[in-house]
Image (tube, grey):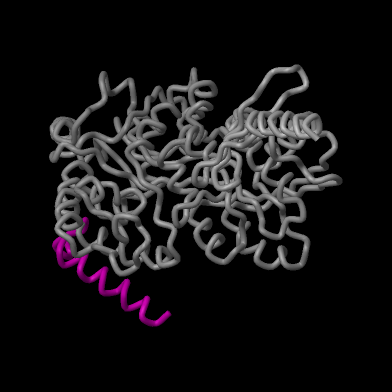
Amino acid sequence: MKKSLSIILVCVFLMALLIAGCGVKNSGTQSESTTQTGSGQQTQQESVGGQEETSAGDKAEEIQPEEGAKLKLWMDNDEYNERIVEAWNKLYPDIELTVENVGTTDARSKLELDGPAGVGADVFVTAHDHVTVAAESGLILENDVFADYVKENFMDVAIQAASYKGKIYGFPLTVKTIALFYNKDLVDKPVETWDEMFEFAREFNDPSANKFALVWQANEPYFAHGFLAGYGYKMFGPNMDDKNQLGWDTPEAIEGMKFYQKLKEIYPVPSQDATWDAMTSLFSSGEAPYAITGPWSIKDFQNAGVNFGITKLPKLPNGNYPITFSTVDVACVSSYTKYPNAAKLLAKFLASEEGLRIMYETKYELPASLNAQETILANDEYLKAVAEQAENSTPMPSIPEMAHVWDPYKKAFTAVWDGIQDPETALKSAQEEFYSVLSTQ
C-alpha cells in the first residue's frame, strides 16, 4: 500500500507540473496561448474577446476564398475592365471574374433590383455619396476584415467618405476635388493668398478685351462651397449627417458668402457667363492666367498645348484655406454575394497598388491610397498638387437630403454674385426653400 501510495503521489505531482506548463493564462477577456510551429519555433497569439488580434496584413492572409467562387464586378471603363481581369487572373487563376460596364452613379440603384434577383455584381464601384444609402438599406457588407488596413493606408478624406456610423464600408479608390490651375507662361509664381490674387487681377483685368485673371464656374455650389467652409461653415453639422443643421443661417456661412461676393472683382461677369465653356476656352487659349477646375480638365489643357501647373487654392484673409468638396469612388461588396470572402479579396485588390496603378493608367485618377500616391505619382506633378488640395477638402455630404441642396444653394450664389440679394438674405431664402422641399417629402 505504501508503494502504491508513493506511485500515486508521484503521478499526481507530475500531472500538476504538466498542467501548470501547458495551462492557458486568462485575465478578463484577454487570453494568451503558445503554440509550436512545424519548425520547432514558438509563436505567440493573443486574442481579445475570443477574436484573434492581428495586423491588417495578417488578416489579409487569414481570409480564404470560397471553393468554386465566381465573381462579377461592375465598373465603368472598358480598358480598365480588361486590364483588371487580366491582373486578377494572375493572382487568383481559380476564381473566375467577369466585369460589366456599369456607371458609378448607377451601380447602387441597379443592385437594388439585380441583387435580389441573383444577377447583381459581387463587387461594384460607386460614388461615395451612395455608400450611406447602400449601408443603411443593407445593400453592402461592412468592411470588417480590412478596416484597419483602410485606416492605416488611405487619405483621411477617403476614409471619411467610406465610413458610415463609425464603420468602414468598402475600399476608397480615387479622390477628386478642385484646385488652382495656372499658366506658367503668364505667371512666374502662383499666388499664395487671395489678397495677392485681388492685386494681380487689378493689374491684369481688362473686361472690354475679355481679359480676366481667374476664371471658373462662379455660381456652381461644387466650386463655390469651399469659400464658406473656409470660414468655418459645416453643412449638416460637424458630422455632416444631421438634416436639421443645414446651417446657411450661421455666422460662418454668412461671413464666407460675404467674401465670395468680393470675388466678382476678380471675374466681373454675370453668373450666366461664368460657365464651364468660358473657363475651358479662356484657359485653353492662353488668355486667362488662372482657372479653378479639377483633374478632369488636365487632359484637355494638355491637348490644347497649355504650359500649366496646379496648386492648392490660395489662403483666405482669415488665414485658412478654402475647404473644397471632394468626391471619392469606393469599391463595395454586395450583401447578396454568394462568395463574401472572395468578394472582399477582390475589393481589396482593386484598392491595392497594382489595382490603383491600372486605374491611374486607364482613367487618370488620383489614388486614395497614400502609399500608391508616393509610388504611382512620383513623376506626376499635376495629381500630386490635386492631392495637396484634397488635404484641404471634405467629402461631399452623403445623407439623402443632399439631393435637395444643389438647387437652392446655386440660387443663393447666383443672387449674391449678380447683386440681386445680400449674402444673409440669399442664404436665408435658400434655407427656407430647402426645408420647404423637405416638408413635402
Magenta span: 417-441
Residue 152, position as x, y percentages in the image: 48, 34
In the rendered image, which quarter contains the C terminus?
bottom left
Q: Residue at x 83, y 42 (%)?
A: 96
Q: Is residue 366 visible?
A: no
Left or right? Give the position of 275 relative to 318: right
Q: Work out which residue is located at the far bottom of the displayed protein and give it.
A: 440
Residue located 50% across and 32% down the image: 153
Magenta stretch, main secondary structure class: helix
When the figure is inspected, residue 423 is found, relative to residue 205, above or below; the finding is below
Residue drawn at x 36%, y 31% is 388
Disc tally is 0
Residue 275: x %, y % from top left: 36, 50
Residue 144 in magenta stretch:
no
Is residue 163 visible in the rendered image? The answer is yes
Report x, y in % for residue 320. 20, 38
Q: Is residue 128 left or right of residue 417?
A: right
Residue 278: quadrant of the picture: top left
Within the image, what quadrant is residue 306 found in?
top left
In the displayed structure image, the side of residue 198 where residue 104 appears, left or right: right
Q: Position of residue 321 (x, y in %)?
A: 24, 38
Front residue (pair 145, 195): 145
Q: State the residue at coordinates (50%, 59%).
A: 132
Q: Nearer the viewer, residue 429 or 23?
A: 23
